[in-house]
Image: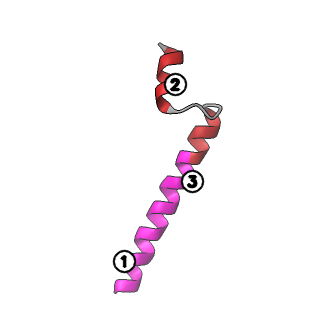
Amino acid sequence: MVAVVSFFWVSLILFFVYNYERLQTKLNGLSPMEFRTKAA
């Protein structure tokens, strides 16, 4: 049971890290603050 739960958390973290990196690339490496300033 513990192994299943830890596997779930690892997958979740990797999923978020992967999406975050894809988002950063999409914004040309700008941080959210810089992007907001540029868009405003």
Q: Which is nearer the N-term, disc 2 or disc 3? A: 3
Residue 39 place in picture, x, y as percent:
51, 16
Q: Which mark is residue 34?
A: 2
Q: Amino acid at mark 2?
A: Glu
Residue 28 located left or right of residue 13? right
In magenta stretch: residue 9: yes
Q: Which mark is residue 5?
A: 1
- Mark 2 vs mark 3: in front: 2
Q: Position of residue 38 (x, y in %)?
A: 54, 17
Q: Residues within 10 Å of mark 1 (few under 14, many from 20)?
A: few
Q: x and y percent of residue 6 in the render?
A: 40, 77
Range covered by the magenta-colored residues: 1-20
Q: CA distance from mark 2 to mark 3?
A: 21 Å
Disc 3 designates what residue?
18
Is disc 1 placed on a helix, strand or loop?
A: helix
Q: Residue furthest left?
A: 1
- Residue at the location (46% across, 69% down)? 10
Mark 1 is on which residue type?
Answer: Val
At 57% across and 40% down in the image, what residue appears? 23
What kind of residue is marked 3? Tyr
